[in-house]
Image: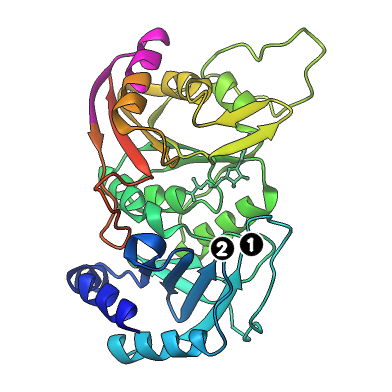
Amino acid sequence: MELIHRALERRAALLERLAAEGTDGVRLLHGIAEGRPGLTVDRYGSVLLLQTGRDVLEPGEVEAIAETVQGALGVELVPVYNHRPAWRAGFETVYPAPSLDDPEVLEGGLRFDARPRHRGLDPLLFLDLRHVRRRVRAHGAASVLNLFAYTCGVSVMAAAGGASDVWSVDFASSSLAVGEANAVRNGVPFHAVCEDVFPAVRQLAGMPLGGRRGRRPDCVKLAARDFELVVLDPPRFAKSRWGVVDLVRDYAALFKPAVRCVAPDGVIVATNNVAKVELEAWLDGLRRCARKAGRELLDIEVLPPDEDFPSFDGRPPLKVAWCRVA
Ligand SMILES: C[S@@+](CC[C@H](N)C(=O)[O-])C[C@H]1O[C@@H](n2cnc3c(N)ncnc32)[C@H](O)[C@@H]1O
């Protein structure tokens, strides 16, 4: 358990800061970057979520890790172990699900659904995006477009920061339903567009949907408009009947319409979580793409992750570009 002790020691200052801001969701061990490939240990409020993607934990390891963490943090946590094999054929449960009463995680004093077992594989709030949510809230834009919204963590933060006009776009109605419940539990406004991002963002940008007339499937009709802040946090790869999300080969397919939805003097926050994509090359691509779309990026600020997502070489796989748009 030396590994866990060291990881917790490294986080001492962060844990204090998070407690002060009203946050109890934190990554406590970050896989290979902290000496244990394939294992992550997260605290989500009262839940201690252990996840493996390759090797299954040895018998007794879950309990030993939980005991170490609880001893060090001085809190009682319910351990849940989810093994997520790479073939993604559903959850292979190798640890009995404890009964949990609608667990929640706190972030900046706001409450989010933290059920560790649900119909999807991923946790319902991605902890590695905490710094983006914090920044979006502090920015205080009045209107926000959240593309690939998932369970709408960014949207709820934006609304808590004063935005009255927040649109959450995702084609998964089940994720948006969790997002709506997150908004309700925090008493903030919510507006979902349950649609593929491609036709939604192209319409908002005033761009044609493409394809021969009559050959395109139906989609939600939207009028062109802009937003003070646009958040573009797509998955690494996803195919739909409208297009391909491919963060290695074609980021521009998303960034071009998204940047056209930004109001003058607004901001677009773009992410890319593919490790092999180099930061500088990706940023150059964003600048070029914006120019081609008729927009200028005035400056780009790269947001480093919080310290619970360490990387070996200071080059985190999740790159976040906060871009001011002319
Ligand atoms: C990695 S999550 C995005 C995380 C999210 N931005 C957050 O703040 O937690 C990926 C999401 O993209 C959605 N998605 C993937 N392809 C899509 C598409 N073409 N149109 C709309 N949603 C899509 C999935 O349903 C899923 O909710």
Q: Do the residues labelled 2 and 1 touch (CB within 8 Å)?
A: yes
The quadrant of the rendered image in which ligand 1 is seen is top right
| Residue 69 image position (x, y, % from top left) | 36, 84
Which residue: 67% across, 11% down?
A: 210
Confirm whether the magenta stretch covers residue 100: no
Q: Can residue 3 be seen in this view?
A: yes
| Residue 123 image position (x, y, % from top left) | 54, 63
Q: Which residue was labeled with disc 1?
A: 85
Q: Relative to residue 32, is residue 254 depicted above or below?
A: above
Q: Is residue 27 visible?
A: no
Question: How far is the residue under mark 2 from the one under mark 1?
Answer: 5 Å
| Residue 36 horizontal side relative to residue 62, left or right | left
SS at circle 1: loop
| Residue 153 horizontal side relative to residue 84, left or right | left
Q: Which residue lies furthest to the left in this view?
A: 13
Q: What residue type is labelled 2?
A: Gly
Q: What stretch is highlighted in magenta?
A: 286-300
Which residue: 24% across, 48% down?
A: 314
Which residue: 48% across, 79% down?
A: 47
| Count of numbered circles on the image | 2
Colour treatment of the image: rainbow
Q: Which residue was labeled with disc 2?
A: 53
